[in-house]
Image (cartoon, rainbow, N blue to C red):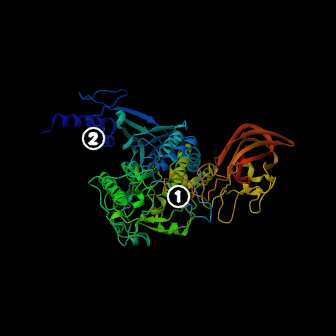
Amino acid sequence: MATRRQWLRSMAVGALELTFGSGFANAVKRAQKLASSTTIAGGETPMTALGESRVTTVKTLEADVVVVGGGMAGVCAAIAAARNGASVALIQDRPVLGGNSSSEIRMHIVGADCHGGRNDTDARETGILEELRLECAVRNPQRSASVWDLLLYEWVKREPNITLLLNTSCVGVQMASENRIGAVIALRNNTEDVFTVRGKIFIDCSGDGRLGVEAGAEFRKGREGRDEFGESLAPPKPDNKTLGSSILFVTRKHDRPMPFKPPDWIRKFPRCEDLPHRAHSSWEYGFWWVEWGGELDTIKDNERIRDELLAIALGVWDHIKNSGFHPESENWALEWIGFLPGKRESRRFVGDYILTQHDLQRGEVFEDGVAYGGWPIDLHPPEGIDTKEPPNIAVKVPLYNIPFRSLYSRNIDNLLFAGRNISATHVAFGSTRVMGTCSVMGQAVGTAAALCVQYNCTPRELGKESIKELQQLLLKQDAYIIGISNSDPYDIARTAEVRTSSEMGGYEAVNVINGVHRGVYASKNRWASDPTQPMPQWLELHFREPKRIREVHLTFDTGLNRELTLSFSDWANRRMIWGPQPETVRNYELQVLYGESAKTIAKVEGNYQRKRVHQIEPQLATGIRLIVHATNGDRSARVFEVRVYE
């Protein structure tokens, strides 16, 4: 016979089924243990349900775009959608934003620049991620993980179109139809609230794909067999194995010996030979190869994986401190260790196109490209630390486009996704999974979502009818797409005459209107003034006839050939310039020209950002002049692009 508590619970869930549908009721069943309450009552105000002492308030929110997951993909998606006019709800199940880059995990953001090792072309990601990196480099000289959390929070909160729900988990969906999501059901346990978040377009940036799975989106898990896509890096037969997870730690050197007494449950690594192929001669920033769990279910077994990773990480530190093989570690001590595993892989959704090893190795330039990657195909053995083989294989690839067709669901009409859950094989995922690439995919789908709302269309329809508009909008907002250049018909700078005070060979002033705003192999695609000539230096655009201008876009040089990312690795930091990038224009003046007269419309000092947009009262002009008074160190004034809009 059922107990009274069980009966009360079944009655509450039954009521929820009648009110919200079975999907919500099933989600609540799963959430009840988490919520520490036996009933959840609906209503506009808190109620005590069926005599229980704790209650949950059910609230309804509405937004044009609903983003689930506040890692780097989700942050960039939310900001992009909001900046393009959509109202956005961003749902994040942690107290901080940033996912694997946050203070909870502390993985540095890597991407197509390959830790700065790709020195033949400008490869660092631009757009929203570049804004954040540049801001962090200037405002976080102490390289604090918590300041990075704060910066991401600030960037999201300052967007008036974003409603941010932290500590809030997607636990279910309401379907508007068989193939269309109507709302996300989300639980915020610390305020005892359940949210019904209605939207038009939904974006899954949750990593594990919780939103899409709840909606019934097709997905894959594990490794495809070699024959399915003809991938040489795939295993001979398919299986459910994945890349494992990692726990990082941070250490600090003190002015005296710092002993380490480990707990008795750690893994033991008595000799260096017990850590084959795993370099551990520097200790300030843990080790990515402290990896485990790829042979388990990285979702369902996540707690077990966390426990084992703690035992492994502390065992590695015990080896360094107490084995006797590293006496120089005597003054080093643990500063921080993660309790949230940095997860690499779980589910991958199926879109209209599945990205493969061949696409990456060919450097495929898809016609519907909206983002790009270039990190090596970086595959790890599922056994992680338990294998005696090298901890990864990394196969270099050229820069490649990521098609829009890999960023929306094949069977759920209003679902987009970005991050490690995109439509790719396990092998291709080995490259696309890194956070720099996830960020630019996030900006792409956020921008696409705003256009879908504007045109009242699905992502698939947008891809078929308006892909060029999406690509041009992304370029305008400082994204990069291989093979796509500025063809914006509203940019009147494209047909202007360009004049300058001086220029270097190969860095001619006319480059600022050639449509490409980064160096691409031998093509510099920027203006740089003669370094032997003193500042100020100037650049002018003259129109064929007077124009009533209202907006000027300036894109400066920020050293995209170098790595720039918050990292606790001394090796990585030696490759960076932490602070304003020396190439960047610091002090400048923008003037509107009319005949022989010039009027200053903007005067900026202390700039360190790459992209600056100046909106002005519409006024008649025959040209514009940019006067560069100083850079952040370089002897040349450097500008990639100038755009002008009526």
Q: In the displayed structure, does residue 402 sit left or right of residue 186?
A: right
Q: In the displayed structure, does residue 20 sit left or right of residue 577?
A: left
10 Å neighbourhood of mark 1: few (<14), some, or many (≥20)? some
Q: Which mark is residue 33?
A: 2
Residue denoted by label 1: 572
x 56%, y 62%: residue:
366
- Say how many tags the image has: 2
Residue 45 position in % (x across, y down) = 36, 26
x 35%, y 52%: residue:
259
Residue 182 position in % (x across, y down) = 42, 42
- Can I make out residue 84 in this image? no
- Can I make out residue 43 in this image? yes
Residue 158, compared with residue 475, is above or below; it is above
Where, quadrant-wise, is the N terminus in this rendering? top left
Q: Earlier in the sequence, mark 1 or mark 2?
A: 2
Where, quadrant-wise, is the C terminus in this rendering? top right
**Residue type (three-letter) at the residue carrying disc 2:** Lys
Q: Nearer the viewer, residue 271 or 147?
A: 271
Tell me the SS state at disc 2. helix
Q: Nearer the viewer, residue 331 or 444?
A: 331
Q: Nearer the viewer, mark 1 or mark 2?
A: 1
Q: Which mark is residue 171?
A: none
Residue 86 position in % (x across, y down) = 54, 40
Mark 1–mark 2 distance (CA, rounded to whole Å):
43 Å
Q: Nearer the viewer, residue 94 or 215?
A: 94
10 Å neighbourhood of mark 2: few (<14), some, or many (≥20)? few
Residue 510 position in % (x across, y down) = 76, 57
Residue 34: quarter of image: top left
**Residue type (three-letter) at the residue carrying disc 1:** Ala
| Residue that lies at the very extreme toward the right in this rendered image | 596
Q: Nearer the viewer, residue 544 or 283?
A: 283
Tell me the SS state at disc 1. helix
